[in-house]
Image (cartoon, helix red, strand yellow):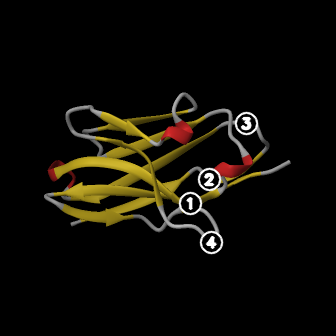
Amino acid sequence: QVQLVESGGGLVQPGGSLRLSCASTGSISGINAMGWYRQAPGKQRELVATQTSAGNTNYADSVKGRFAISRDYRRGAVYLQMNSLKPEDTAIYYCNADLWGMNYWGKGTLVTVSS
């Protein structure tokens, strides 16, 4: 099993930047993909970005060119650099880890983009 804890959320003005972090503990050596998902009020949870253990990345079209995912494989950490934030990026952001085919989730961190 792994435990995931997100940090770095907060209130930011449109056009601003935030960096989210996710730390993991447990069987981190078995983690394959890690990533970020988000859920806005009244909407379903959606993929933001993922990165496999081979380094392959996948981004939602809505964040391409603005967000960047990175990982610290030794520490089992994943980061999300978010630039040029828009009000529609407002959501709870969840960290996700794929450990031997099982999905694990953090409790989420709230990102609010508003003037």
Residue 16's label in the rendered image is 3
Percent of width and height locating residue 62: 56, 41
Q: CA distance from mark 3 to mark 4?
A: 24 Å
Q: Are marks 1 and 2 in contact (CB under 8 Å)?
A: yes
| Disc 1 target residue | 109
* Element on which disc 1 rests: strand
Which comes before the other along the chain, label 1 or label 3? 3
In whole angstroms, how far apart are the C-alphas of marks 1 and 2? 5 Å
Report crowding for label 4: few under 14, some 14 to 19, many 20 or more residues within 10 A (C-alpha).
few
Which secondary structure, mark 4? loop
Asked if 39 appears above or below 58 in the picture, the reply is below
In the rendered image, the vertical position of residue 69 relative to residue 107, given as above or below? above
Place residue 51 in its image quadrant.
top left
Q: Tell me the crowding category of disc 3: few under 14, some 14 to 19, or many 20 or more residues within 10 angstroms, Cα based.
A: some
**N-terminal-most mark, 1 or 2:** 2
- Where disc 3 sits, the SS reads loop
Q: 88 or 81: nearer the eye?
A: 88
Distance in Å between CA atoms under marks 4 and 2: 19 Å
| Mark-to-mark CA distance, 4 and 1 | 17 Å
Q: Which residue is mark 4?
A: 42
